[in-house]
Image: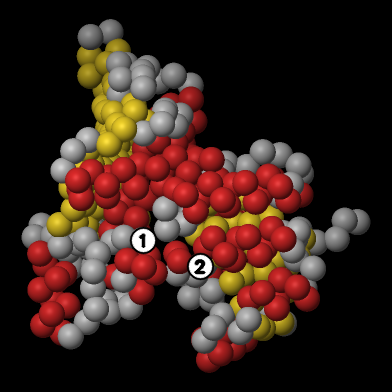
Amino acid sequence: MAKKLRCGVIGVGMGKGHIKGYQSHPDAEVVAVADTDPVRLQAAADELQVPQRYTDARRMLRRENLDIVSIATPNKFHLPLALAAFDAGCHVLCEKPMALNAAEGRRMIAAAKKARRRLMINFSYRFTEQAAALKQQVDSGILGDVYFGRTVWHRRRGIPRFGGWFGIKKLSGGGPLIDLGVHRLDLALWLMGYPKPQWVMGGTWSPIATRLAKEQGKKFDCEDLACGMIKFQNGAIVEIEASWAANIAEHEWMETRLLGTKAGLVQRNRNEGYEFEAEIFLERSGAQYDMKLHPPVPGSQSSYYHFVDCIRNKKPHIATGEEGLIVMEILDAIYASAKQGRPIKIG
C-alpha cells in the first residue's frame, strides 16, 4: 500500500481551508503547519489535529520531508516561500494571486521546472459545482466562439481586515483587483480556454477607502475599485471590475457572463452571498431557451483534493503556474494602464 502524501501548510489563517482540503483525501495527511503567530498556530493545529507546528516555515521545509506545501500567506511572501519549497523538493499549491507581479511569477515557474515539481495556483472558484458543469458544457461547444465577456466582483463595503496587509501595496501588490478580481478573471479565462491577451486598458480609484482610512487612522495605499478591458489575439474582449467599496445596492455582487456565437452563459452569486447559480441561454429552431443548472453536480472536487489526486495518479493538474502568470500579466497591465493613462500591450 502506497504511503500517504505528506502535506504542510504555511499560513493558518486562510490555510485552515487548505488543511481541511488535504485531510479530505484518503491518500494525503497534513503532518505540519507553520505560521509566524504562535497563538494562531497552536489554535489551528489543535483544532485540526496537526502534529507538528513551526513559527519558522523554512525550518519546517528542512525538517519534515514534505511532498506538498501550501502557501497561504500575504502575497509578498509567495515567491520566497515557493522557492524554498521547491529547493526542499516539494510540490507547491500557492494561494492566488501567485505573486506580487508577473516578474515574480516567472521566477516561480522557472524554479518549479528546475526542481521538476508542480506549481498550482489556488483559483478556487473553478472548483465549484457550477463552474465544473459550465466548463463541461463549454468544452462540448455549446457556446460556439466566445467574443465578449464581463466578469465582476463588487462589494458595497468590504475591505478585508481594514488597516492590515491587504491594503498595503508592498505586501499585497494591490487592492480588490488582485484580491477579488483575480478569481473572476481566472474563471472567465478558464471557461474561454485561456486565450492569449493582446492589450489592456484599465483604471483604478480609491475615494471611499482613502477617506475611511484617514478617518480611522489606518494605513491604506491601494485602490478600492478597479476596472479593465482586455483584448485577446482571437478578437474577443473581456471586461473586468472589482471593488472593496462602491456605492451599489448589493452587499456582495459576483457575476461572470460570456457571450458566444451559439449561446451565452452566466455564473453568479445568490442572495448577495457565497451560494452560486449558473445558466446557459441559447436558441433552438428559432426559439429562445434557458438552461438552468440544478445541483448537486457529480464529480466536482476541491482544489486541494484535485492537486493530491493528480500527483498521486500522475495526471496533469489544472490552474497551472502558466495560467497564473497570464492572470498576473493582465493585472500588471491594468495597473500600468491606470497609472500611465494609455493601453498597455502584452506579449
Residue ID at (50%, 40%): 323
Q: Is residue 216 above or below residue 78?
A: below
Q: What colour scheme was applied to this rendering of the protein? A: secondary structure
User: How far from the left and from the top, in percent, is residue 98?
Assistant: 48, 54
User: How far from the left and from the top, in percent, is residue 70?
Assistant: 60, 63
Kindly identify the amino acid type of the residue bearing the numbered disc 2: Phe
Give the labeled residue for mark 2. 77
Total number of numbered discs in the rendering? 2
Residue extending furthest toward the bottom: 39
Q: Is residue 159 above or below residue 254?
A: below
Kindly identify the amino acid type of the residue bearing the numbered disc 1: Gly
Q: Is residue 342 above or below residue 50?
A: above
Image quarter of the C terminus? top left
Instruction: Say which label, 2 or 1, has the lower sequence index.
Output: 2
Residue extending furthest toward the right: 1
Residue ID at (31%, 71%): 168
- Element carrying mark 2: helix
User: How far from the left and from the top, in percent, is residue 247?
Assistant: 8, 60
Give the labeled residue for mark 1. 173
- The image quadrant that residue 209 belongs to is bottom left
Q: Does any portion of residue 25 appear in the rendered image?
A: no
Q: Residues within 10 Å of mark 2 (few under 14, many from 20)?
A: some
